[in-house]
Every structure is written in structure tokens, then in C-alpha cells.
Image (tube, helix red, strand yellow):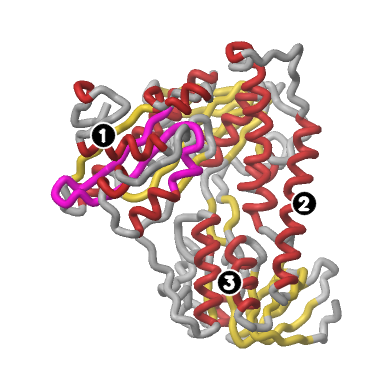
Amino acid sequence: MAGTYARSTEVAVLGGGPAGYMAAIRAGQLGKKVLVIEKADLGGECLNRGCIPSKALIHAARLYHAIRGEGPEIGVSASDPRFDLAASMRWKTAVVEKERQGVAALLKSAGASVMPGEARFTGPHALDVRGADGGHERVDFAFAVIATGAVHSTLKGFETDGETVVNAWDLLSLKSLPKSMLVLGGGVSGCELGEFLARVGVEVTIVELLPQLLPGLEPDLSRELTGALERLGVKVRVGTKATGLAREAGGLAMTAEGPAGRETLRAERLFVTVGKRPATRDLGLEEAGVAFDAKTGFVGVDDRMATNVAHIFAAGDVARPPMLAHKSYREGVVAAEAIAGRPTRFQFQCIPSVVFTDPELATVGLTKPEAEAKGLRPREARFPYAALGRAHASHATSGWVKVVGDDASGRLLGVHAAGESVGEYVAEAAHALEMGATVRDLAQTIHPHPTFSEALQEAALLWLGEPMHVARRRVDAGGR
């Protein structure tokens, strides 16, 4: 890479993660000359250090745990099943590499070029790209999409070292399993990866500052997961503040203060997962004239994903919460279509969310308290997986689906679910919400049998007071 060389492109995309590569693919489809600038690997954190590798390891741990636990009960036995971390890591890496190659092929098919390097704005129509060899190139552009994603937040006194104190990136590349692990942060990453560790024999303690695991999630879902984790042997400390960390022989000692007072928690290693912040530092946003929140780092955008600089757009984790890959996908597409002059908007009634624990958790739309705060008259009903034939056949009777509807209009307001495969059918609920469906619309939609998705229909019937697979006498205001 020569320092004096310059190139130009119609659309420069900063970042090759979910928002960036989707923007590049769509812009290429619409006839634009596109250059994707990525400092690491295509696919971003989701593909390389988040969604995909974590789900690969979670799948391996679940299989191992199922063979040892439920296997004998349903007639599946294996002598001395073992979890081979190195083999699972190799498989995880192979999955990631295959997916990464797929992203590269999709970009190529759309006519988008890829440039390795780290980009920084030097003006409203120019970038400086620093390569791995230290060289620099100038890139001139007509339009730009900022899609640089997010980085892990740090906590003073609990800085990671990649060995004893680790973040999610480190955890997904472990060389050996510790006997014990403290998890500082009970959000999605802490719960998913904490459960993964517990399933393969690690003693896990999760410490969360706020009153529940998965802060902000529907409280019943949090309670369901908390119970499942505790039955797995995970120690859960909520409403607990970590106040100090010391290294000692054999591991770490973390002091914490919670409902039970002050205590010292010990483990071989500590996994710190206290959130993320937009990766907008050192991007030269000031030089480009792009406005952003100095405190949070988020770039301001409108419903076309345009910033205050009309030809510069932002999408994904840098733009606004929630930091979800599927939300980033859509934002990237909208940015590309806006650049191409298409009539497009990032408009939605709801964004579904899934937590890949066991039970799996899924939520979309309003909770009952949220609906009440909007002046609606919400009522909820909850259908148990224990009344579902497919759940019994699959040895997965723990879980439920809750429907929230407006008592005045009958309109569907939200769906919240815990149990096997809920993430696979929550999009049906999202679609119903987007279309303004009523609870009866959901109840009258014929669902295939036997499937877990029938629980959604059954919860709607229960809400209507017309239950078919639980006795009517059991129906109360809570649908239990």
C-alpha cells in the first residue's frame, strides 16, 4: 500500500459487518460502484466473534449435556461421553470461515470491492485508509456508509488481560476450560456463555448490578432463565455490585456488595461482559462534519439512515440501539436504497429479540406494563409447553408463550416466550404486529401439527377465553 496512491468510489462502506456488507450488497445490486473498507475480517463481530461462533459452541455444549442428562431417560446411552474443547473450537472456526467466505462471495457477486485497512475521514468526501503494513491510501467518495459496529465497554479495576480476565472475544477462543468462572454482567452474552460453561462442567457465578438477569427483558422471561440456570448449578447474584478485584494463588478474588451484604467471590478466571459502545472513536467524524453524541458515541440518523451530512449515512450498532444483527441488516439495506434514490424508510412497529439459552427466550412488542403506560387496556394469557404434544415428544416441556392483547380493541400488542425453538417462530408474531393483527387473527391462523409454534395459536385462544388444549376451568386472568 503506497502512501501517495488514491482511488475513488461512488459508495464507501466503512466496515464489513452485518450493516456494512448488507449495504454494500444492496448498493451493488442497484448499480452503484462500492468499496468496502474492513480492518479485520468480513462479517464483523457477529460472524467472527459473536453470534455465529457462540451459537456453534452452545450447540456443542447442549449436545454433550443432553447425552449425559436426558439421553438415558429417552433411550439414548453413550459410555463415557466427553467434551473436547479443542475439537469444538476447530469446528467453530470451520463454521466461521465458511460463513466468512460466503460473505466475500456475496460481495463479489454484487460487484462490490473489498479493501483491507482502517478508514478515517479527512473531509466530507475523503478517507485516509491505513493498511496493516502502515501504509496509507486516500479514498475519495460520493457517498459513505458508516458501519463500524461496536466494541466492548471496559470497567475500571476490571480491565481484561486476555488470560485471567477475559471478554467475549477471548472466551470464544479458550485453549482450556477453567474449573471455575466468575461472570461480571448478566446480559445476553453473560447468560448465554455462562450457561455454555456450566454445561461443560465449569463452576459459574453470574454477578449482575441490576435487580434481574437480562435487564430490560420481560420479567417473567428473566425469572424463567434464572431458575433454569440455578438448576444447572449456576450461582446467580443480582442487585450486586462488584467493588474490587484481586489476584491470588490459583485465581481471582472479587469483592461484591448485594442484598446479602458484602462477600468475596473466588474463581480461576473472570469473564467481563458489561455492554458495548459504538466504534466511532478516531473515525474523523469531526473532519467530515458528522454529528454524534459525545457521551454515548452514537451517530445521529434519520429514518433513511442519513446523518446531518446528507451524503453520509450510518447503520448498525453505530447508529442507535438495540445492537442486534437483524436490525443492522435492515438499516444497511435502507441506507443503500436511500443512496440509490429509492423511496425507502427504516420504519417498524417492533424488533424481535432472542436469547439463545435453555430455555430459549424470545420477545417482540409490548409488555403489559409498557402497554399500560401507553394508555391501553392490556390483558395477557400464558399457554404452557406442558400442554403441547410436540413439547412432550421432544422432552422439552419447560416453557410457555405469553400473548398480550388490548382488551378494548382485541389488537395484538406483544408476544413473549420461553422454551424450545421460540426464536424460530417469534418472527410470526412480529409479522402479525407489523400488520396490525388482532389476537383472533393469530388464533384463527392454522398452525402445523405437531410443532412448537402451535403454542402461539393456543396462547391466543387462551387470551380469547376459547382454549382448546388446556381445560377452560383452568383459565384465569394470567392465562395459567
* In this rendering, position of residue 30 left or right of residue 208: right
Q: Is residue 347 left or right of residue 176?
A: left
Which label's residue is closer to the chain start, 1 or 3?
Answer: 3
Residue drawn at x 38%, y 63% as measured from the top left: 348
Front residue of 403 and 14: 403
Q: Which mark is residue 97?
A: 2
Quadrant of the snapshot with the N terminus: bottom right
Q: Eyeballing the image, is 414 above or below 149?
A: above
- The amino acid at mark 2 is Glu
In this rendering, the answer to whether 365 lies above or below 252 is below
Residue depth check, mark 2 versus mark 1: number of the one nearer the observer: 1
User: Is residue 437 found inside the magenta-colored segment of the image?
Assistant: no
Describe residue 391's horizontal placement relative to residue 96 as left or right: left
Tag on residue 208?
Answer: none
Q: Amino acid at mark 1?
A: Leu
Q: Identify the residue under disc 1.
A: 462
Classify 10 Å Cα crowding around label 3: few (below 14), some (14-19), many (20 and above). Answer: many
Helix, strand or loop at label 3? It is strand
Which of the marked residues, 2 or 3, is nearer the chain's N terminus? 2
Q: Quadrant of residue 271?
A: top right
Tell which tag, 1 or 3, sits nearer the viewer. 1
Which amino acid lies under the numbered mark 3 shown in the image of this protein? Ile
Magenta residues span 399-426
Residue 102: horizontal and vertical position, in percent? 73, 59
Tell whether position 411 is magenta: yes
Check contact, mark 2 vs mark 1: CB within 8 A: no
User: Circle 3 sits on which residue?
Assistant: 146
Label 2 crowd bin: few (<14), some (14–19), many (20+), radius 10 Å: some
